[in-house]
Image (cartoon, coloured by chain):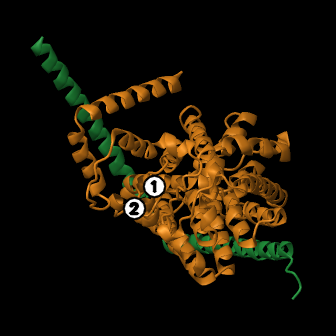
Chain colours: A orange, B green
Amino acid sequence: MKLKQIFISLLFAMFALTTLLQASSSDVATEVVVQEESTEKKAYEPKSIGELATSFMETTGINAILDVNDGEMTSEPKGPEYEREMTWFESSLGRIIMILIVFILFYLAIAKNFEPLLLIPIAFGGLLANIPLAGMGGEHGMLGIIYNMGIANEFFPLLIFMGVGAMTDFGPLLANPKTAILGGAAQFGIFGSLVGAVIIGFDIQDASAISIIGGADGPTSIFIANRLAPDLLGAIAVAAYSYMALVPVIQPPIMRALTNKEERRIVMRTTRKIHRLEKLIFPIVVLMLALLILPESAPLIGAFAFGNFAKESGVVDRLSDTMQNSLINIVTIFLGLGVGSKLAADKFLVLETMGIMIIGLIAFSIGTATGVLMAKLMNKFSDEPINPLIGAAGVSAVPMSARVVSKVGSEEKPGNVLLMHAMGPNVAGVIGSAVAAGVLLSIFK
Amino acid sequence: MAEVNYIVEALKFMVLGMGVVFLFLFLLVQVIKIQAWLIAKYFPETTPKAPATPVANTTEDENRRVAVIIAAVSEFRKNKS
């Protein structure tokens, strides 16, 4: 219905144009000259109406989609020398499929409220990247500029990490430090799926980049993908963020399957009070440990520690407020659009994407499962009761997975609030996945 | 050279990676414990007592001020009507 309307109005426009051209060809001549001025000043040669109409037709999107062998080039942010000719599929059907995928993402973000802050910019970036002939993702296109500005050099993920650091409260972790180990157990998802990806047939370096999705940490995934497998960045980022959005769907069944009713009903003791100094010193301590053990993780942990230190210092509220709000919002817009540029049909519709989506899901599930199992083990040997559910929060989707844990816990036993207890493994998970990322980087250095 | 078995390589990555992650977090836990102990020893919590009284005072003052403002506003409205 809508399509028909558009088509008819287009025909009308064409008709109006041709009659107008016949009426005054001199006017049009100046117009065309203005159009061509931007590329190269050429002496204008008189053209017939027919020629003008066909040359216009060649620049329309309809033509670009219908004419499958027009030799359109892919747009690459690195510059024209990396461009290649599109295949017929990429320049026609592929675009349409991608635009449909974008609409599905819009639906998920708006109607289902799945991480709309990320999905909307990413999906819109994808829509822009699939406009034919516009070269939005190219070196001088809007998306390409954004991509070169902060994604190709890994700057935006670090800024996000800074903001996350400024938002994170380490209180629950400091109150019950043992639970940090759970944040480590969940990183099995990363390395387990690394093995899986290699078995499927991915190159080991690509496999490492993909498996980081198991850390359920968007910025870390982008950071690593950029270093290890820049070609797969789009698929990895989209997979990481869509699984983060799907935490409330994916985690609860796994959590229920691995625990029994008794365990889910365990009430944990209230946490001790934290001295302000402890919180203040903590980011420095984490940074010192990173410095001693794994300098490779310094960019991620450094940005995180800086954000947290600014917050806990209590004297630069203006700065920490900026990091938590305006800065992270601005960067999210750019990051989303930049990642969206990788949703162009020629980059996204490749066989690897399917594999990445599947491995991402496996990675995420293993992470949840090992976290829960580790928590069960700790509960057996600890003198304090530990609800195994909090292990699931070890994947670092902050604070989503902690909220999911709390929800499942209170369904089983109303009034049992696990949120604060789950935040411990949750923030330890962020540190854990940054460390795991550092290990992978150190291997491929 | 024989063909590299990437699955074995990946398993090695796993051992190394999980080892480092656990080592890091284990050290972190120990450091948190030491830090909590040190801070409890050398900087005992004295802060909650000191602000306790002034806080109560200020809220009382606040309540009185709010009451005064409400009275003034209602008086003003009465006059107006």
Residue type for callout 1: Gly
Q: Which mark is residue A140?
A: 2
Q: From the top left corner, tell me how far across and down residue A177 is, in percent.
A: 65, 64
Q: From the top left corner, tell me how far across and down residue B36 is, in percent.
A: 58, 69
Quadrant location of the C terminus of chain A in the rendered image? bottom right
Residue at 66% from the left image edge and 44% from the top image edge: A246
Outermost residue, left direction?
B79
Determine the chain carrying the residue at label 1.
A
In which quarter of the view is residue A405 placed? top right
- Visible residue check, residue A50: yes
Q: Which residue is mark 1?
A: A135
* Mark 2: few/some/many CA within 10 Å (<14, 14-19, 20+): some
In which quarter of the view is residue A380 placed? bottom right
Q: Are marks 2 and 1 in contact (CB under 8 Å)?
A: yes
Under circle 1, the secondary element is loop
Under circle 2, the secondary element is loop
Q: From the top left corner, tell me how far across and down residue A376 is, in percent.
A: 82, 54
Determine the chain carrying the residue at label 2.
A
Residue A445's place in the image compared with A128, above or below, is: below
Residue at 14% from the left image edge and 14% from the top image edge: B78
